[in-house]
Image (tube, helix red, strand yellow):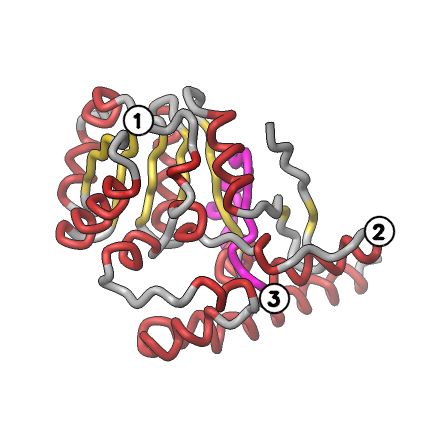
């Protein structure tokens, strides 16, 4: 059984457990049949975590938070080196598409619920996941009308499906808000937030070559592919995060 080692990322106040994709699948297998929450952290989530108290509350429910951004992995390695441990390689930066592609290794995941994005992208992502393994049974709800109906009925359709794994791709912070508000209504399953991964799996958004994530360059590929949507996240938010953390540090020093 894979044991999750948690690290506090220096300066960002977030905690993560670095795993490579095969370890993620082993961890999921160990939690099938239990209501379990698997989140992830990158600079975007770190910014929301430090500026939106309600977003932070969802992370307090998490059983596991993966490293989904190369700067987060760098922070983990700073902590490891400070404790005389060897730094981790790039494969420990694991995006949702990375571990989803390894679902064929799962011993226990057979029923997968795909929730999020629009109808067309949702269906195409679900078909791609179903094609990974003939044993998979995949049910799907888009992130708009179908999800609204599902919530109105207390997630009865989702409970009736009896998923082992729920992929929730509404984007941040909508998916985290839904989890916080509806946690007690969700079924006994591994619930994984996957952000825009459904649109990448469906081909609606360009998926970066996976090696770029391991060397810290996926953000540049995504920015070039969709500058209008992602320029604020990649070019502005890091500075806003730095200003927020700097202000907090000055406040702490002033009152110490």
Real-space Cα separation, disc 2 to disc 1, in angstroms? 40 Å
Q: Quadrant of the N terminus?
A: top right
Between circles 2 and 3, the one closer to the viewer is: 2
Judge whether 7 appears above or below 27 on screen. Answer: below
Residue in the picture at 31% in, 77% down: 228
The image quadrant of residue 142 is top left
Q: Is residue 172 magenta?
A: no
Residue 25 horizontal side relative to residue 171, left or right: right
Q: Earlier in the sequence, mark 1 or mark 3?
A: 1
Asked whether residue 26 appears in the rendered view, the answer is: yes
Q: Quadrant of the C terminus?
A: bottom right
Q: Is residue 16 above or below residue 161?
A: below
Neighbour class for label 2 at 10 Å: few (<14), some, many (≥20)? few
The residue closer to the viewer here, 12 or 29, is 29
Disc 3 is placed on an element classified as: helix
Is there CB contact under 8 Å for labels 2 and 1? no
Asked whether the residues under the numbered discs 1 and 3 touch, taking CB atoms below 8 Å apart as contact, a structural biologist would say no
Label 1, on which residue? Answer: 163
> Which percent across, then down, holds residue 156?
21, 23
The residue at which mark 3 appears reads as 244
Image quadrant assignment for residue 134: top left
Left or right: residue 57 versus residue 242 is left
Q: Residue under circle 2? A: 83
Separation of disc 2 and disc 3 at Cα?
A: 27 Å
Cβ atoms under marks 2 and 3 closer than 8 Å: no
Real-space CA distance between mark 1 and mark 3, rounded to the nearest whole angstrom: 39 Å
Q: Is residue 57 visible?
A: no
Q: Which mark is residue 242?
A: none
Q: Which residues are magenta?
A: 50-70
Quarter of the view holding residue 230? bottom left
Badge 3 crowding class, 10 Å Cα cut-off, few under 14, some 14 to 19, many 20 or more, is some
Disc 1 crowd, CA 10 A, few/some/many (<14, 14-19, 20+): many
């Amino acid at each position: 059984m894979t044991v999750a080692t948690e690290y506090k990322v220096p300066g960002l106040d977030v905690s993560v457990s670095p795993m490579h994709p095969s370890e993620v699948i082993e961890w999921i297998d160990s939690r099938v049949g239990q209501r379990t929450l698997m989140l992830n952290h990158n600079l975007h989530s770190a910014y929301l975590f430090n500026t939106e108290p309600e977003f932070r509350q969802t992370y307090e429910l998490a059983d596991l938070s993966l490293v989904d951004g190369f700067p987060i992995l760098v922070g983990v390695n700073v902590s490891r080196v400070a404790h005389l441990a060897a730094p981790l390689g790039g494969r420990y930066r694991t995006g949702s598409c990375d571990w989803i592609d390894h679902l064929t290794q799962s011993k226990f995941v057979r029923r997968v619920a795909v929730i999020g994005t629009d109808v067309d992208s949702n269906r195409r992502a679900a078909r791609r996941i179903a094609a990974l393994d003939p044993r998979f049974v995949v049910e799907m709800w888009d992130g708009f009308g179908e999800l609204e109906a599902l919530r109105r009925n207390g997630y009865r359709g989702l409970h009736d499906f009896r998923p082992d794994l729920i992929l929730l791709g509404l984007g941040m912070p909508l998916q985290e808000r839904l989890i916080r508000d509806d946690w007690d209504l969700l079924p006994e399953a591994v619930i994984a937030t996957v952000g825009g991964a459904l649109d990448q799996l469906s081909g609606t958004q360009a998926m970066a070559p996976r090696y770029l994530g391991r060397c810290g360059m996926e953000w540049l590929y995504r920015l070039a592919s969709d500058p209008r949507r992602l320029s604020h996240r990649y070019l502005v938010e890091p500075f806003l995060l730095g200003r927020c953390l700097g202000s907090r540090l000055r406040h702490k020093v002033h009152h110490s």
